[in-house]
Image (spheres, grey):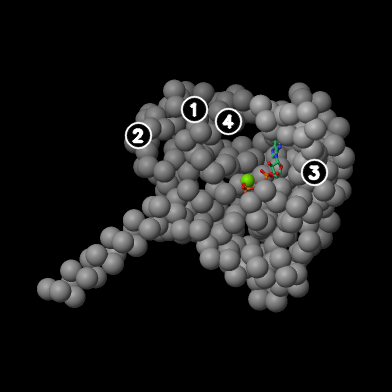
Amino acid sequence: MNHDQDLVLEATGLDKTFLARKGLRRPGTRAVHAVCNVSLKLWRGETLALVGESGSGKSTTARLLTLLERPDAGSVRVLGEEWTKLRPRGLRARRRHLQMVFQDPFASLDPMKMVVFTIGEPLMIHEGLKGADLDRRVLALLDLVGLPASALHRYPHEFSGGQRQRIAIARALAADPAVVVADEAVSALDVSTQAQVLNLMKDIQAERGLAFVFITHDLGVVRQVADRVSVLYHGEVVEEGAADAVLERPRMAYTQRLLSAVPEVSARDREERRAVLARLHSEAAS
Ligand SMILES: Nc1ncnc2c1ncn2[C@@H]1O[C@H](COP(=O)(O)OP(=O)(O)OP(=O)(O)O)[C@@H](O)[C@H]1O
Ligand SMILES: [Mg+2]
């Protein structure tokens, strides 16, 4: 394990500074050093969790790793190749190796596009597939993520949140990537759907040797999926290591605080818990 030929992603000294957000830019506003000298390594088949409080630079790091945003300094190597110096065309040609899944599957799916074209787009672009060949490959991907064949000719609004996230995952997988960067990919889902989608991702990972960068503020999710953890604080990696070690014996007071913080309970979870409680009460009463 951990041989260099299995090193799929290596970021070194990433740096990014923003002026204040557009529209909020006033004279004298300070720049935000969102990501500061971040380095990380990812090996084939493993999951690295990126954790940290809100605003610590997790999403910015994800956007730098995937080159959706150019770093001010530092390098990103994917499958041994330097990506930061690539021109847009070169980057587009290689994007399939490194895919991203976002929190909100609704925003990341084109509402006007049928599932077959949403999932099949990478296959059309990179392999020139169309017609029955395209359908066949997309059907296999639908099967892989546990969606019925009937999904092929439907639109995103016809699916639940969990199903839409499965579509987004199938689309990411269509490109046959070496790395998937998932930014709060299951955070919007209720607890049981979350568990299903996480299990699905783990199964696919085992099958294909995929590597994940998993961004989450939910330490329950970290426990379920992570091999290693990097902790971000004000844009810097302040602690990293094997997931068990970081979770059980955090070195930094900040990490301890993160770990002890009461997890956010989404409105949906609350509803679900209320429903379960109501059912238990009525069962007890009868
Ligand atoms: N496009 C941008 N323009 C200006 N500032 C930005 C931009 N993107 C991020 N920032 C700032 O950079 C810092 C890091 O933001 P980032 O979104 O990476 O944090 P995060 O860890 O993903 O937070 P969250 O958990 O809330 O998603 C924040 O202070 C944020 O306001
Ligand atoms: Mg974020």
**Circle 1 Cα neighbour tier, 10 Å, few/some/many (<14 / 14–19 / ≥20):** some
- In 3D space, how far apart are the residues under numbered discs 2 and 4 (Cα atoms)? 23 Å
| Snapshot quadrant of residue 26 | top right
Q: Viewed as shown, does residue 118 lie left or right of 256? A: left
Q: Earlier in the sequence, mark 2 or mark 1?
A: 1
Disc 1 secondary structure class: loop
Residue occupied by mark 4: 123
Q: Spatial distance from mark 1 to mark 4, Cα to Cα?
A: 17 Å
How many angstroms separate mark 2 from mark 1 (CA)? 13 Å
The label on residue 118 is none
Q: Position of residue 254 (x, y in %)?
A: 71, 66
Is the residue 131 above or below the residue 193 in the image? above
Q: Residue at x 44, y 23 (%)?
A: 112
Q: Earlier in the sequence, mark 2 or mark 4?
A: 4
Q: Is mark 3 within 8 Å of ligand 1?
A: no
Residue that mark 3 sits on = 33
Tell which of 207 and 119 is nearer to you: 119
User: Which residue is pictured at 29% across the width and 64% down the height?
Assistant: 276
| Residue at mark 2 | 158
| Quadrant occupied by the C terminus | bottom left
Q: How many marks?
A: 4
Front disc: 4 or 3: 3
Question: Which of labels 2 and 4 is toward the front?
Answer: 2
Camera-nearest label, 1 or 4: 1
Report helix, strand or loop for mark 3: strand
Considering only order in the chain, which callout, 4 or 1, is on the residue closer to the N terminus? 1
Q: Is residue 89 visible?
A: yes
Question: Residue at 24% across / 70% down in the picture?
Answer: 280
Callout 4, which amino acid? Leu
